[in-house]
Amino acid sequence: VEWRTVMNIVVKFCFVARNADVIELTRQNFTFVRDLLYVHFPHAKNDQYWQGNTTMFEASKQMNYCPVYLLKKYFERLGYDENSKGHFLPKVTLKRDKNLKKSEWVAVPEEHISYSTCLADRRKVLAKLGLPAREFTEHSDRGGGASHLFNNGATIEEVQSQGRWKSNVTPRKYIQKNEQKGREISRKFFSKK
């Protein structure tokens, strides 16, 4: 459950995605090509023609725990191959082995978790990390991802593209400038270009 929750947060942050968009994903929506990961979001509330949208992410060669690497490991752990139709965030059930007298959590790939389970699991993980779980909403990952991109040099248009927004007005509502970005913007008043 915690592994699933962490991967949910990672995907929503890195792909600047809505909770509702991520819950519906299956393994088939993830395509690994060399060092690239393509995630196809089949539909979203701003996709009026239900055409879907694909977003790409490049693996980081300097980090062992980049999203591409983590997602590959996550799918291996779930037992999903590239042709699997299992949900990205599958329900889990407690399976008891009477012979070994032990229980283990097992994924139910044909069913995805509910929206409320997704949020409850997230709160549990954040609380275990000592974070004020109630202060984080379902939009925290999307807003955090958008803010991170912008504060690290991405343009509004690049943030818009990663978040699959139709206009560049909406990402502006999510972005929170950090002090460094505020200083960079302020310095532009005094630059001699």
Image (cartoon, grey):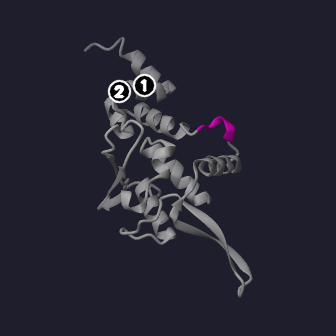
Q: Nearer the viewer, residue 158 or 179?
A: 158
Q: Residues within 10 Å of mark 2 (few under 14, many from 20)?
A: some
Q: Is residue 6 above or below residue 96?
A: above
> Going by the image, does 40 lie left or right of 94?
left
Mark 1 → mark 2, Cα distance in angstroms: 7 Å
What span is colored magenta in the figure? 132-137
Residue position marked by numbered label 2 in the rendering: 168
Kind of residue indicated by mark 2: Asn
- Residue located 43% across and 59% down the image: 26
Classify 10 as above or below 47.
below
Above or below for 108 versus 135: below
**Which residue occupies 67% across, 41% down?**
133
Residues at marks 1 and 2 touching, judged by CB atoms closer than 8 Å = yes
Is 37 colored magenta in this rendering?
no
x and y, in percent, of residue 154 in the image: 35, 33
**Image quadrant containing the N terminus:** bottom right
Q: Which quarter of the picture shows residue 67?
A: bottom left
Q: Which residue is mark 1?
A: 172
Image coordinates of residue 63 in percent, x first then y, are 43, 55
